[in-house]
């Protein structure tokens, strides 16, 4: 089905943080693949390791307290986790770019927008001032900022939230990266702006043939955007499938619960939204058995004893569960 | 009665953003505006300019040789037409000496501030940015300097080094070597406070998302420190630098008054006070003029510092 080349191949990534209270097991063995020009979404509650996974790949985990215990992240055959800081500086912003959640804080308040967007151009492409200015104008135009010639001299406080996120995108796209990591880029924006940003990313992705990893906790955002979805829980991938497959035929109880919690326009409005009882596990203790067991409605003895492996349940569809939700009984 | 024509479509479309709203002010313009609204700061700034003009412009009226010329026949003369500020214990003209002394005092203030800035910002930046062991080490050193009473340290260092440095000549003028000693001594004893301010700034600013975003675009550590963090922490550095000029002038006056500061014949406002305490009642002009000038400049600088603190504060609502 997927004949495109693998561009990013993450193998068994484990990231921990050593803090005063003990060790936080943030990412506990995540493997995933990303193909050229493909968009995948990583979904999960807050604190389930989505961002930490991607920050680990980018080499942006502060060490200490962070520690990447094991794993490899092959980008076009090179293991990013084995590269030195100086080598990573050449890759960050040029090959892999990242957009962050809160555009209000992700821009430096004392530098002009133009100055910030031209930063990767100067760092990676050694552009001189005039060429960089020209490119910044093009980029701002591309992300839909009106009057870019004048607006590039503005400071971030003169931009609205949506415009700042557009500027962040322009900055990320400056060197035409092969992979764009978008860490909940629309969470801080209202829905109409959110839709615009999603539309913009989709358009730019298709124009530039860029692979996108979209981190979100909003399954509703994913539908029109991604080809494949990876559901994470407690630092583990619990389900992985194509978007349609995941919505039509979810196999992991956590995914089922997430989908049930989604507000639907075709459902009765006077009903309360369903929520998942309990809270995500405390990652200060290494999860024993299935991490979702305490909140799972299908839980049985085996779940508490052994962590299930990520097993194929259908074509291009894998889930990490001992229970067969389709047939309503445990797997053999 | 004139009928009101509905606005034509073209006229609305022609309104460019510049017409619709006043162009937003840059951070610099906002700061300048807030500073101008600060009455005491304006007073301080004007006073400061006048004092600088007095010290450096006065040099065109009196020569330095005149300021240092002793005339034993004219000792301790009260202010007169010939000597508007009177004469001192060895018959030197006090007006001319306050002019040349002012130059030295202001220069000591500024250079001591530079020394303080260089050490304080470097230590604070390294400490705050890298953290960990380096931070602990540098902060213990900083605390070690802070716990020694500053005046005590100043006096010991001034006494220890003063004898060993010969006179120096810069720009055709000869300075007592003790000027350099005083500058270094003041700079070396005052930096810890600035280092702590800069460290706390770095600690909080480096946690910002825009630092992570800058790193994600491949910006190097040096660029992050100098282009992203330092400009964001410049406000408290400017304020504290301004105020430290005033404190350096006061400190110089203090050690010079005790006779350990700048050696005569080089005049400073501080060392003109030396020995004046013997004549507090009998020759008031000995201490009044240099004392008043010190008080004025320190007050002006503090007003300016206050004004800058308010003007540079982005949260300040006063526009």
Image: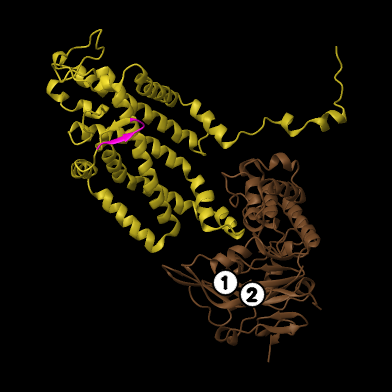
Chain colours: A brown, B yellow
Residue at (69, 41) in percent of width and height = A151
Is B271 on the left or on the right of A28, as rendered? left
Is B76 on the left or on the right of B208, as rendered? left
Residue placed under numbered mark 2 in the picture: A78
Q: Chain of mark 2?
A: A
- Magenta-colored span: B167-172
How dense is the environment of label 2, judged by Cα within 10 Å: few (below 14), some, or many (20 and up)?
A: few
Q: Is residue A208 above or below residue B34?
A: below
- Give the residue furthest to the bottom: A332
Residue placed under numbered mark 1 in the picture: A83
Q: Is residue B266 above or below residue A282?
A: above
* Image spot of residue B208 (x, y percent): 53, 53
Element type at marker 1? loop
* Image spot of residue A84 (x, y percent): 54, 69
How dense is the environment of label 1, judged by Cα within 10 Å: few (below 14), some, or many (20 and up)?
A: few
Element type at marker 2? strand
Residue at (43, 42) in percent of width and height = B237
Query: Is the residue at mark 2 from the same chain as the one at mark 1?
Result: yes
- When asked about the image quadrant of residue B289, the answer is top left
* Image spot of residue A42 (x, y percent): 67, 68
CA distance for labels 2 and 1: 8 Å
């Amino acid at each position: 089905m997927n004949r495109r080349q693998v561009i990013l191949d993450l193998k068994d990534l484990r990231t921990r943080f050593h803090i005063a209270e003990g060790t936080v097991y943030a990412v506990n063995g995540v493997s995933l693949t990303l193909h050229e020009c493909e968009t995948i979404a990583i979904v999960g509650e807050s604190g389930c390791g989505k961002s930490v996974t991607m920050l680990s790949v980018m080499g942006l985990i502060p060490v200490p307290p962070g520690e990447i215990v094991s794993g490899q992240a092959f980008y076009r055959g090179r293991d990013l986790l084995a590269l030195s800081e100086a080598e990573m500086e050449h890759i960050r912003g040029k090959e892999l770019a990242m957009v962050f959640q809160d555009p209000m804080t992700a821009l430096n308040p004392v530098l002009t927008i133009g100055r910030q967007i031209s930063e990767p151009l100067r760092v990676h492409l050694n552009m001189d001032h005039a060429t960089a200015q020209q490119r910044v104008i093009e980029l701002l135009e591309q992300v839909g900022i009106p009057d870019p010639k004048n607006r590039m001299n503005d400071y971030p406080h003169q931009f609205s939230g949506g415009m700042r996120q557009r500027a962040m995108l322009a900055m990320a796209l400056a060197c035409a990266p092969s992979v764009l990591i978008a860490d909940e880029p629309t969470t801080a924006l209202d829905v109409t702006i959110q839709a615009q940003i999603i539309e913009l990313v989709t358009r730019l992705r298709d124009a530039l043939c860029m692979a996108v990893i979209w981190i979100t906790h909003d399954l509703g955002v994913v539908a029109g955007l991604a080809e494949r979805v990876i559901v994470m829980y407690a630092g583990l991938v619990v389900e992985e499938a194509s978007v349609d497959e995941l919505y039509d035929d979810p196999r992991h109880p956590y995914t089922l619960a997430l989908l049930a919690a989604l507000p639907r326009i075709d459902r009765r409005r006077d009903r309360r939204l369903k929520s998942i009882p309990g809270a995500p596990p405390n990652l200060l203790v290494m999860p024993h058995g299935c991490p979702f067991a305490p909140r799972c409605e299908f839980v049985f003895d085996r779940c508490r004893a052994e962590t299930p492996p990520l097993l194929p349940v259908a074509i291009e569809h894998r889930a990490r569960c001992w229970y067969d939700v389709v047939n309503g009984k445990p797997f053999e | 009665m004139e009928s009101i024509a509905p606005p034509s479509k073209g006229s609305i479309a022609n309104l460019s953003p510049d017409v619709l709203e006043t162009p937003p002010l840059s951070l610099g313009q906002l700061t300048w505006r807030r500073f101008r609204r600060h009455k005491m700061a304006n007073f301080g700034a004007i006073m400061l300019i006048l004092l600088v003009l007095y010290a450096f412009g006065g040099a065109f009226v009196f020569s330095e040789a005149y300021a240092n010329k002793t005339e034993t026949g004219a000792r301790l003369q009260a202010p007169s037409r010939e000597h508007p500020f009177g004469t001192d214990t060895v018959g030197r003209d006090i007006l001319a000496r306050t002019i040349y002394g002012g130059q030295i005092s202001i220069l000591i203030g500024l250079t001591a501030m530079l020394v303080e800035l260089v050490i304080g910002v470097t230590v604070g930046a390294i400490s705050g940015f890298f953290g960990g062991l380096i931070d602990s080490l540098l902060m213990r050193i900083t605390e070690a300097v802070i716990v020694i009473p500053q005046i005590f340290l100043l006096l010991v260092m001034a006494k220890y080094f003063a004898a060993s440095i010969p006179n120096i000549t810069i720009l055709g003028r000869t300075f007592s070597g003790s000027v350099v000693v005083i500058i270094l001594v003041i700079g070396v004893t005052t930096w810890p406070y600035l280092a702590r301010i800069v460290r706390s700034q770095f600690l909080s600013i480096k946690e910002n998302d825009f630092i992570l975003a800058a790193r994600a675009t491949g910006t190097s550590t040096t660029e992050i420190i100098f282009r992203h963090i330092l400009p964001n922490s410049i406000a408290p550095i400017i304020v504290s630098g301004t105020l430290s000029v005033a404190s350096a002038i006061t400190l110089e006056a203090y050690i010079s008054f005790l006779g350990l500061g700048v050696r005569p014949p080089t005049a400073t406002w501080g060392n003109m006070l030396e020995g004046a305490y013997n004549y507090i009642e009998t020759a008031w002009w000995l201490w009044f003029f240099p004392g008043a000038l010190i008080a004025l400049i320190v007050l002006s600088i503090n007003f300016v510092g206050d004004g800058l603190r308010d003007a540079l504060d982005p949260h300040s609502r006063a526009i």
